[in-house]
């Protein structure tokens, strides 16, 4: 058996949670392979709304195994809050969720260090969510991190104290020395670490490969989006992990030859949260309409998302990097009332037309080259089959397929699980 991968092709917030939930019945296992609790996957069904930060989006189905992989960084406090909220909804999480021993822990001082780093950057700040994710990945790469498996070691407290002292020295060097809230944060953190111990702590690479050998179907769930990948995104305004298909291999211990279908998710337009380049960003009434109609606010932070027309230069790049085999277009209904739909097919840089995504989008004056298509001016949120869709919308989808060279297999026309059209 091979694993299928589902990931975002833009700057995150594409709607991955809903699609994982829709696809999960086809799979025996859903595994999250990277990222931290800054990624809020929103799911809506049966009149209820759920926001998942670290827990895979397959937990609402029955019988599936859900795994938090080694490539994830986990905040025990936020995890416990999220898990308890789900328990109150009737979900027996310890029964269906397993945690990789090799996943790294976000410490209380990681969050403080995150804030200190951002403050020190001033106007050049990245725009992180302040959840301590960057400093946790920094410790991982510098071989100073604490992992979930360490929580059962007899000297765990000593390892924690050593990490804390290192962080306090780093913060002092940044001019941040007083942390009156640390004792309270630590108390909650250690309580949450105790809570973690009721879950199955597993060697996830062995478990996943055994499941594959037993013929089980595995879906790998990514967080954020391709354009936030630490290697291939709009650096330095990126996240701290590999959000691309290759991240599923390193984040779960799956060999490259075990990758099957790659589902690439994108919005019918484009959004971005936080700082960083965004060539097709709109500052006019159209951008505001997209934000208002699409409820474009962060699921975890509530931050206003920047909105713009679809960027096919970035999408072509994302399709190439990820080896996308199937496309999924989200929030198609948000554009229902626009007279004209624009799509950026190329960039103009210093008077030259550029077809490929450039090295440094942050340092360039980019003018998007747009193709204009007629809007469909038809509400689609109640439509349940492809035959009902307006012709101009079908033409928009066909145009995107031609530009990207990959078929669009699922269309989302609303936030609910039921508002999904499979082609």
Image: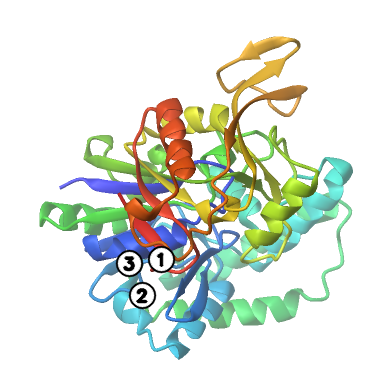
Mark 3 Cα shell of 10 Å, populated few (<14), some (14-19), many (≥20): many
Can residue 131 be seen here? no
Q: Depth-wise, is mark 3 or mark 2 nearer the camera?
A: 2
Question: Where in the figure is residue 86, as x and y percent of width and height?
Answer: 46, 82
Tell me, yes or no, whether the two marked residues, 1 and 2, touch with CB atoms within 8 Å. yes
**Nearest-to-viewer mark from 3 and 1:** 1
User: Local crowd at mark 1 within 10 Å, few (<14), some, or many (≥20)?
Assistant: many
Instruction: List the residue tagged with mark 3.
Output: 66
The label shown at residue 60 is: 2
Q: Nearer the viewer, residue 55 or 72?
A: 55
Disc 1 versus disc 2: distance between alpha carbons? 7 Å
Whether tag 3 and tag 1 are in contact, CB under 8 A, the answer is: no
Q: Which mark is residue 57?
A: 1
Question: How many numbered marks appear?
Answer: 3
Q: Element type at marker 3?
A: strand
Q: CA distance from mark 3 to mark 2?
A: 10 Å
Residues 326 and 2: in front is: 326
Q: Quadrant of residue 391?
A: top left
């Amino acid at each position: 058996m091979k694993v299928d991968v589902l990931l975002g092709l833009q700057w995150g917030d594409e709607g991955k949670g809903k699609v994982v939930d829709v696809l999960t019945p086809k799979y025996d296992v859903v595994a999250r392979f990277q990222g931290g609790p800054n990624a809020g996957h929103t799911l809506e069904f049966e009149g209820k709304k759920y926001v998942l930060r670290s827990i895979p989006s397959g937990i609402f189905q029955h019988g599936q195994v859900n795994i938090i992989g080694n490539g994830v960084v986990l905040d025990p406090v936020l995890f416990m809050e999220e898990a308890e909220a789900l328990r109150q909804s009737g979900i027996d999480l310890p029964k269906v969720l397993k945690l990789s021993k090799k996943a790294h822990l976000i410490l209380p001082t990681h969050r403080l260090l995150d804030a200190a780093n951002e403050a020190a950057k001033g106007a050049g700040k990245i725009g992180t969510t302040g959840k301590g994710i960057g400093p946790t990945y920094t410790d991982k790469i510098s071989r100073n991190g604490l992992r979930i498996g360490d929580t059962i070691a007899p000297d765990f407290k000593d390892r924690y104290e050593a990490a804390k002292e290192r962080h306090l020295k780093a913060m002092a060097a940044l001019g941040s020395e007083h942390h009156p809230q640390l004792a309270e944060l630590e108390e909650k953190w250690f309580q949450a670490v105790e809570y973690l111990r009721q879950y199955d702590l597993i060697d996830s690479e062995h478990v996943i490969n055994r499941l594959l050998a037993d013929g089980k179907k595995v879906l790998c769930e990514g967080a954020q989006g391709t354009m936030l990948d630490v290697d291939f995104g709009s650096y330095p305004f990126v996240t701290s992990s590999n959000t691309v298909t290759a991240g599923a291999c390193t984040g779960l211990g799956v060999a490259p030859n075990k990758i099957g279908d790659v589902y690439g998710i994108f919005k019918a337009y484009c959004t971005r949260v936080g700082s960083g380049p965004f060539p097709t960003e709109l500052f006019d009434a159209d951008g505001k309409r997209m934000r208002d109609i699409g409820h474009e606010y962060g699921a975890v932070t509530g931050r206003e998302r920047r909105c713009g027309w679809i960027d096919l230069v970035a999408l072509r790049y994302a399709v190439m990097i990820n080896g996308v085999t199937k496309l999924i277009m989200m929030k198609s209904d948000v554009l229902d009332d626009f007279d004209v739909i624009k799509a950026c097919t190329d960039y103009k840089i210093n008077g030259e037309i550029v077809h490929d995504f450039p090295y440094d989008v942050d340092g360039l004056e980019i003018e998007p080259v747009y193709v204009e298509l007629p809007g469909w001016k038809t509400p689609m949120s109640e439509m349940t089959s492809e035959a009902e869709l307006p012709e101009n919308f079908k033409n928009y989808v066909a145009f995107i397929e031609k530009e990207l060279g990959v078929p669009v297999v699922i269309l989302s026309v609303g936030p609910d699980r039921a508002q999904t059209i499979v082609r």
